[in-house]
Image (cartoon, rainbow, N blue to C red):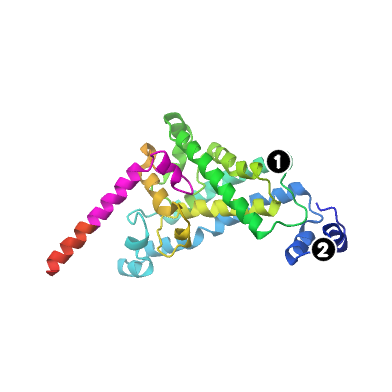
Amino acid sequence: MLPYATAAEAEAALGRAMTRAEAAWLRYSAFVPDHLLYCHNVAILLILYTIAPLPLALLELRARAAPDGVAAAVMRPSTYKLQPRAQLSPAAFLRCYLDTGRVLLLTVGALSLVSYPVVKMVGIRTGLPLPSAGEVAAQMLVYLLVEDYLGYWIHRLLHTRWGYHNIHRVHHEFTAPFGYAAPYAHWAEVLILGVPAFTGPAIVPCHMTTLWLWFVLRHLEAIDIHSGFNFPFNPTKLIPFYGGADHHDYHHRVGGQSQSNFSSVFTFCDYLYGTDKGYRYHKASLEKGLLKGDNKTKLLKGV
């Protein structure tokens, strides 16, 4: 809740005119308690989880229901889908969505109610001024790097015998991941993975709007790497060291015995600690097979 009753008071405190974004933030948050602003994370997460994976889910279901020739024209699964033989029914999509939504509501919702004092303690602010675009971008980069490094080690711990059997195996029920399966996990894993996600903002405190943006970005990234599709025009391919769906899909395909590709965002932890050897061998084998196939085609054509 901002300590300004009017825009004039806010501008007097700032010593300048407010930007349009700041004026909009003042109108929205002036009479909303800070703890309720923080709890917006729950609504943002559930809305994003419902909408973001939907286009690819509908595309996949449409292609599955269409005749073979039509399906090829609709989606070309052999080109874009990483595991084209894996097909899920509408009931499986719905079960995943409902189970995950319930877990997110109970865990993230309950955590938001009790964690607000920590949010205030680390310095997450709601007042004016709003952060600049450069400040937000720098904070996002820090949060991604921190979350990726801590998440890598937590993921490795979850693949120990006890961690996998008691917690992480739920997430690996889907060996061919899809967007709605991104947060599909044991309730304990949802809470555990909240630690690396919040560590960055705890180290480098930010504005509440930046915190919202960070959770949106992190969830979209999780949906992307679990999408099950490797589109050549995906803009994330322009991000240096970004793993993407192909990198994480291999981890799910191997399953519970996987000791490869633990990184959630970037690939350098897997490279530095030698946990990408299986994946690199897999990619090299695929490329070798493609080269052999191309040579065979050329021989058949007399090239």
Q: Residues within 10 Å of mark 1 (few under 14, many from 20)?
A: some
Specify the quadrant that holds the C terminus.
bottom left
- Dot 2 falls on a residue whose secondary structure is loop
The overriding secondary structure of the stretch rendered in magenta is helix
* Residue range of the region highlighted in magenta in the rendering: 261-290
Numbered label attached to residue 16: 2
Q: Residue 129's quadrant in the figure?
A: bottom right
In the picture, measured across the screen, residue 15 lies left or right of residue 303, that is: right
In the rendered structure, does residue 287 fall within the stretch colored magenta? yes
* Viewer-proximal residue among 263 and 225: 263
Residue 268 magenta: yes
Residue that mark 1 sits on: 122
Image position, residue 177 (x, y; %): 42, 50
Q: Quadrant of residue 6?
A: bottom right
Residue drawn at (59%, 47%) of the image: 143
**Image vertical order of residue 79 relative to residue 173, above or below:** below
Q: Is residue 109 above or below residue 130?
A: above
Give the number of the disc on residue 138. Answer: none
Q: Nearer the viewer, mark 1 or mark 2?
A: 2
Q: Which amino acid type is shown beneath numbered disc 2? A: Arg
Q: Amino acid at mark 1?
A: Val
In screen coordinates, is 252 left or right of 105?
left
Left or right of 201, for residue 156: left
Please count the marks in the image.
2
